[in-house]
Image (cartoon, coloured by chain):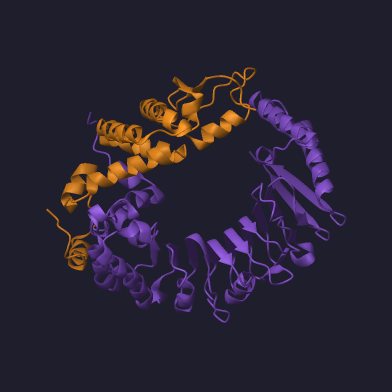
Amino acid sequence: MEAEPRDLLSDLPDDILLHIFSFLQVKDILCLRILSTRFNKTLCTATPSFCFSDHYLHPHNCSCTHIFDFMFNTVPKNRPHALIINRVSFSCFCNKPEHRNLHKQWIIQLFKLKPSMFYELSLDYDLPSIFTSLPKFQSLKVLKLNMNQLHSVNMLPQMKLAALETLHIKSIYSLNGLLGEWISQSFPFLKHLFLQKIIIWAVKPDFTIRSSSLVDLVIHDLRSPIPVRIMAQNLRTLSCFIRERVHEYNTKFVLESCVPNLQSLTWVGRRVGVDLETLKNLQVTTNPRFLITRESKWDVLIQLFQAIRSARQLHIDTDVLRQWMRRTIMGILEESVSLKNLSHLQIDVVG
Amino acid sequence: MSSSVEAITVLSSDGDEFKITVSAAKLSKPLNWMLEDVCFSDDCDEVPTIEVNSKTLVKVIEYCEKHAPRANSGASDSDAEELKKWDIEFMKMDVKDILFHILMAANYLHMEGLYDLACQTAADLMKGMTVSQIRKIFHIKNDFSSEEQEQLRRQHPGCSFD
């Protein structure tokens, strides 16, 4: 059984190690730092993060006291570069009534505790009031907020986080439609924006994201009755995953000349809902598997895709097939969008 | 476009052939994608290779076959209880080195259930242990200098060493 005493645990990549740690209690995680430089590094330097998960935060095994101890004694002494609060919400935190209030206090305390020392904050927590605390997190580079359930939130109109480069927002109801303006004005150096499960309530003629720093934008299930206008001079990649069967919201995206540097567009959804009237340079990455419809052209495309796969396996040259495929995709694109001014089009097929 | 076959054949990284039922293969995202593509249609006789060694693949397939019926149909609570017990037994049989191969394989094959189970098992081995016990269990070499070690000890007074 025992072949050689090889240290396989230390060979694991950081993300697997961190996932293992997420099943441990805070006090156990902290002790792991003393094991070896590899562990000290994973926990403090390379991926400096602390993960809390709800696995041990249930009523039978409440570790609220450890978390308090961690927050008020360990964190100020050790100064983590990142704090990842993972999968914690009131419903699964701890059911002891006397602890419930403490949780709220704990979160509030967390924001009081010099939040300027965090570079990354992931909050998977029903805490809409986080938005009012955000201006304190001036050192944040990465901010990931998942409200778990749809929440209408109050955005502070005049806040600024100058260091922020990556923003993920999930499950938000923008009742006053201010989300676009908030993103446009609050993060002057934002590079990566990820929006998921966002519902816009219409009060304005359009929902605009305006940013000169934005490089890539991923939109996953955004429902808006008004056109979504993206004005980003430096945007390189845009990926839209639009859910089907949402008839009441036929979200339309207006890009026009606002994204002169767009190089890659990934569109997953039945109809390409992008207006590309003046776009000059476009590289479409499409995965036909996601685009299956009853329309015959797509069937042709799928057959072509399969033919390429088979040909590749038999080591047959696929150039002719690929050209065919591009032409078919072109045909589909031309039907759905107007590409009058397009001078250069490159289509890559992934899968 | 998946074909009507009920089981597929895959190769391990050691080159051995393994059969896995379609419903079990669906637990893995990459395998599921392969199924949707043409990899397993009748006119294609190339067997795809999975970068997992034979010893590990046997375990992974065993897990898939056990969990497939529930994942595909949804089962009663009593079944879920039984499955949980089975999971615990399943992980018990593992010597430590195969556990890490299973971790890597579950991560590589995008099998959430198995990945969580394996991570949980690894975490359970560390829980409540002293630093030197963990080092012994996982063969972790202490590569700190004595000053660093001393400093870390001072920073973490709550940790037990021996």
Determine the image quadrant of residue A162. bottom right
Determine the image quadrant of residue B62. top left
Residue A140 horizontal/vertical position (percent): 47, 71
Could you tell me which residue is drawn at 28 percent across and 34 percent down?
B85
Instruction: State the hue of chain B.
Output: orange
**Visible residue check, residue A138:** no
**Visible residue check, residue A272:** yes
Farthest residue in the right direction?
A340
Could you tell me which residue is drawn at 45 percent across and 26 percent down?
B12
- In the rendered view, would you say A250 is above or below A145? above
Name the one closer to the observer, A90 or A331. A90
For residue A278, side relative to residue A252 (left or right): right
Number of callouts: 0
Quarter of the figure with the C terminus of chain A:
top right
Q: Chain coloured purple: which letter?
A: A
For residue B19, side relative to residue B46 (left or right): left
Residue B137 horizontal/vertical position (percent): 20, 43
Residue A303 horizontal/vertical position (percent): 73, 29
Name the one closer to the observer, A305 or B152. A305
Could you tell me which residue is drawn at 34 percent across and 62 percent down?
A44
Quarter of the figure with the N terminus of chain A:
top left
